[in-house]
Image: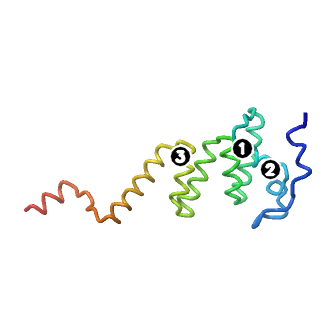
Amino acid sequence: MHHPLSCIKRMSTAPSRGADPNNEVANSPVIEYIISINMEKVLNPKERLILIRKGNEIFNNGEIEKAAKIFTTTAYRDGLIRVGDYYYFEKRDIIKALQYYIEANYEKRIREVSERIAGVLKRWLGEPKKESTEGQKENKE
């Protein structure tokens, strides 16, 4: 039986576009292998912790997509929320952010983003905004 990491020798060690060529962690063939792990694989707690730490390091180095793959693989809720927040607040990509919030089951932000999307759709469709009861009273007088 082959060790799961035995195929590392065959993997490319070329850095991804935009990556720091001196970043040994991000350019490691081990990380490339780990990212490609089938998501159904069950990680033991030690493997999961190592991956989460690497994911955090990669995230902090600005490689958000690589970190997101690791956070998804490890089902690391806090990391997925950080990725969602990155897309929501930094990139203003609410659809992509919503995907990560759903993956993390982050109810508060899912509700917030959904309400924002619904507001945009209402404006597009020309539906009037709900007025406060005070505003309605003033219009009737």
Relative vertical location of residue 106 with respect to residue 42 in this rendering, above or below: below
56, 106: nearer the viewer: 106
- Mark 3–mark 2 Cα distance, whole angstroms, equals 25 Å
Mark 1: amino acid: Ile
Q: Position of residue 38 (x, y in %)?
A: 73, 42
Residue 31, disc = 2
Q: Which residue is mark 1?
A: 52
In the rendered structure, the answer to whether residue 123 lies left or right of residue 19 reads left
Q: CA distance from mark 2 to mark 1?
A: 11 Å
Amino acid type for the residue under numbered disc 2: Ile
Q: Quadrant of the N terminus?
A: top right
**Residue wearing tag 3:** 102
Q: Residues within 10 Å of mark 1 (few under 14, many from 20)?
A: many
Residue 132 picture quarter: bottom left
- Tell me the element at label 2: helix
N-terminal of the pair, mark 3 or mark 2, is: 2
Looking at the image, residue 49 sits to the left or right of residue 2; the answer is left
Marks 3 and 1 close (CB-CB < 8 Å): no
Q: Position of residue 128 (x, y in %)?
A: 26, 62
Q: Is residue 110 left or right of residue 25?
A: left
Residue 66 horizontal/vertical position (percent): 71, 54
* Front-most of residues 7 and 60: 7
Q: Does dot 3 land on a helix, a strand or a loop?
A: helix
Q: Earlier in the sequence, mark 3 or mark 1?
A: 1
Front residue of this view, candidates 139 and 121: 121
Mark 2 vs mark 1: which is more N-terminal? 2
| Picture residue at 13% right of the left edge, 61% below the top | 138
Q: Residue at x 90, y 52 (%)?
A: 10
